Amino acid sequence: MIPPFLFWTFALLLLVFGAAVVLNRNPIASALSLVISFIALSALFMSLDAFFIGIMQVLVYAGAVMVLFLFIIMLLDLRAEERRKINVVATTGGALVALAFFAQLYLVIGQLRIASQPFAPLPPKTDDVRNVGALLFSNFNLPFQIIGVLVLVATVGVIVLSKRELR
Amino acid sequence: MSYLQLLRLASPETVVVVTTLVVLAIGLRNRQSPGLNILVAVLGLAGACAAVFMLPRSAVLFAGMLVISPLTSLFKVICLLLAFFTLLMARNLSSRNHAEYVGMILLATIGLMLLVGSEELLMIFIGLELLGLSLYVLAAFEKHDIRAVEAGLKYFLFGSTASAFTLFGISILYGMSGTTALAAIAQKLAGMPIEPLLAAGVVMTLIGFAFKIAAAPFHLWAPDAYQAAPVTSAAFIASGSKVASFVVLGKIVLIGLAPLHGSAGWHAMAGGWMPLLAVLAALSIVIGNFVALVQTNVRRLLAYSAVAHAGYTLLGLVAGGREGFSATLFYTTIYALTLLGAFGVVGAVRREMGNDDIRDFCGLSRRAPLLAGCMAIFMLSLAGLPPLAGFFGKFYLFSAALRAGGNHGLLWLVALALFGSLISLYYYLIVLKVIFVDAKQETAAVAAPQLDLLQRATLLALAGAIVLFGIMPQTLVSRILAALA
C-alpha cells in the first residue's frame, strides 16, 4: 500500500498528461506526454502490488512503443497541427455525452459495496512472471496464438495502406 | 491437451491461416494474376470446409474458448461459403495488391470462424478484433479513392470506440463473475439481483455487437462503408460479419446472460437485456426504413435497409429460446446470401456505368436481363414477398416473437416490424421499377454489363439459393433446430 498522497499525485499526473496528449498541437509533445502518463499508470499498477504489469507498462509501452512513435513522427516530419475552427454543437454534444457517461459510472461505482471495502492483500510471494508465462502456454494458449494472426493482419494492413504505389 | 490435439480441433482455422500465407507469398512473386490468388484461396476454403466435416461431433477446449458442436460446425461452413462467394466476386478489383486483398478476406474469415466457434469472452473479443481490423483495411483498400478512405476511417473510428466499450463491459462482467466462460458466467449470475454495475456491464458489452450488426443508433458508419468501400468489401462487411455477429450475440445473451433476460412484453416490462435489444430493434426498424425512403444511391439504400433488417433479426433474440434463436440464425443467413447477390449486381452495374445511383439502373432489364432478373429476386426477397426465402424468414421470426413472451407480449414489436416491412416494400419496388419500367433516352449508347461465366454462375447460384430456401425452408431450418437441440 502506498500513502494516499502518492496515489493522488500519480492519478493527477495520469489525467493531466492524458489530456495533454489530445490537446497538444505538436505531435512530439503529444507523444512525450503519453510517455509520462504511461509511467504514472505503471506507478498506479505497482501501488496495487501488480509489479509485473507495472514493469511491462514501462518496458513495452513507454520504452518500445513510444520510441517507435517518436521515430515515426520524426521520420514523417510532422508539423504542428493547424488551428481548426471548433464545431460548437459537436463539441458541446460530445462533452455532454462524456459527462453523462462519467456521472453514470461515478454513481454506479459509488453505490457498489465492494468499492468501499479495502482490497484484500495479495499473498506475499506471488511469482508473477512465472504464473503469467505458465498460463499463457497452458489455458490461454489458443488466444495467444490467435494474437499472432492479429499481428499479421495489422502488419499486412499497414503496409498495404501506407505503401506508395509504383506506377 | 497436447499441441497435436489442439491443431486437430482447430484444423479449419489452421488451414485458412496457411492458405493466407500461401496467397501472400504468391503475391510477393507474382503481382499480375488475380485468378491464381483466388484459385488458391478457394482451394483453401474447400480444404477448411473438409476439415470442418472431419471434426468430432462435439468438444470443448479451454473452458469454451473453442467449442465444437453441430451449431458451430454448421455456421463455420456457412461463413466459409460466404467467403467463397465474396472471393468469386473479388476478381475485378483493379489493384496491384490483389493478393493482399484476398489475404485480408481470408484473415477476416478466420475471425468469423473464431467468433462462431467460441463461448468465452476473451476469445470472442480477440475474434471481434481480428474480424474488425481486417474489415477496416478491406473498406479502405482503394486508397486512391478519397471516399473509400473516408469510409474506412469512419468505420475504424466508430469500430474502435465500440470495441473499447465492449472491452470495458467485458471487464465489468469478469469482475462480477470472476470468469470469462459464458456458461460459468450464467451460473455465477444466476442468483444475483441486477445491480447498477452489472447493468452497466451488460449495456457496454452489447454496444460492440450493436455496432457490428449496424443496429440503430450505432449504425452511422454503415451508409458510408456500404456506399464508398470497394463493392466486394462492402458485400463481405454486410454479409459475413453480420452472420457471425448475430451468432455470437445470440450466444452471449442466451447462454452467458441467460439469468438477466428481463422481459420486453408491453404489459410486463422488466429490466434485463430483452428490453434493451427490443429498444434497439424498434429504433433500427423505424430509422432504417424511413431514412431508406429518401436514398438515391442503391448501396446507401441497401445500408439503411440493412439497419432495418438488423432490427427484424433482433426480434428473434428478444423472443429468446431455441425457436427464437433459430429464427434469427435462419434469417441472418438468408439475408447474408441475398445481400451478397445484390452487391454482385451492383458491382456489375458499377463497372459499366461508373456509379451506382438508382438512375444508373435505368433500363437494366433490356441491357442485361439476367442481372435484372437476379436483382428482382434479391429485392423481392428483402422485401419479404412469397415464395422467396425472405418471406419465410420474416414469417418465422414474427411468429416466434408472437408466441414468445406470454400473452402476446411482443405484439407491439411485431406490429412495428410489419409496418416497417410495408414501408420497405415501397423503396425496394422503386429500384425494381427503375430497372424494369423506366426507359431512358441514351439506353442504346450504353453497352450491356460484361459478365464472365463465373460471375454469372455466382449470381445464379445465389438467386437459386434464395428461391430454393423460400420453397423448401425446412432444409436449413431443420438443420439449425437440430444443431440447437
Image (cartoon, rainbow, N blue to C red):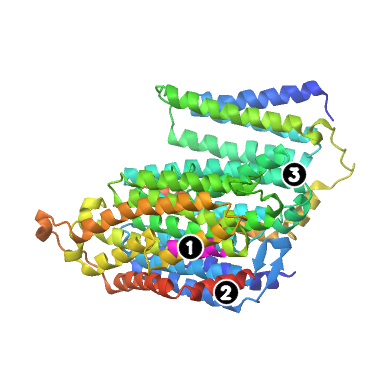
Q: Are marks 3 and 1 in contact (CB under 8 Å)?
A: no
Please name the residue shown 71% across and 66% down the image.
B61
Q: Position of residue B177 (x, y in %)?
A: 76, 48
Disc 2: which chain? B
Is residue B230 visible from the viewing direction of this image? Answer: no
Q: Position of residue B419 (x, y in %)?
A: 41, 51
Check residue B331 in the rendering and tell me which mark sits there, or answer none. Answer: 1
Q: Position of residue B472 (x, y in %)?
A: 44, 76
Q: Earlier in the sequence, mark 3 or mark 1?
A: 3
Badge 1, how many Cα within 10 Å: few under 14, some, many 20+? many
**A58 on left or right of A87:** right
Please name the residue shown 38% across and 42% down the image.
B150
Q: Is residue A49 above or below residue B427?
A: above
Q: Is residue B329 magenta?
A: yes
Please name the residue shown 21% across and 64% down the image.
B449
Q: Nearer the viewer, mark 3 or mark 2?
A: 3
Q: Is residue B7 above or below residue A129?
A: below
Q: Which residues are magenta?
A: B326-335
Please name the residue shown 50% across and 65% down the image.
B330
What distance separates the C-alpha of mark 3 from that of mark 1?
A: 35 Å
Q: Nearer the viewer, mark 3 or mark 1?
A: 1
Residue type, mark 2 in image: Val
Q: Which residue is mark 2?
A: B52
Q: Earlier in the sequence, mark 2 or mark 1?
A: 2
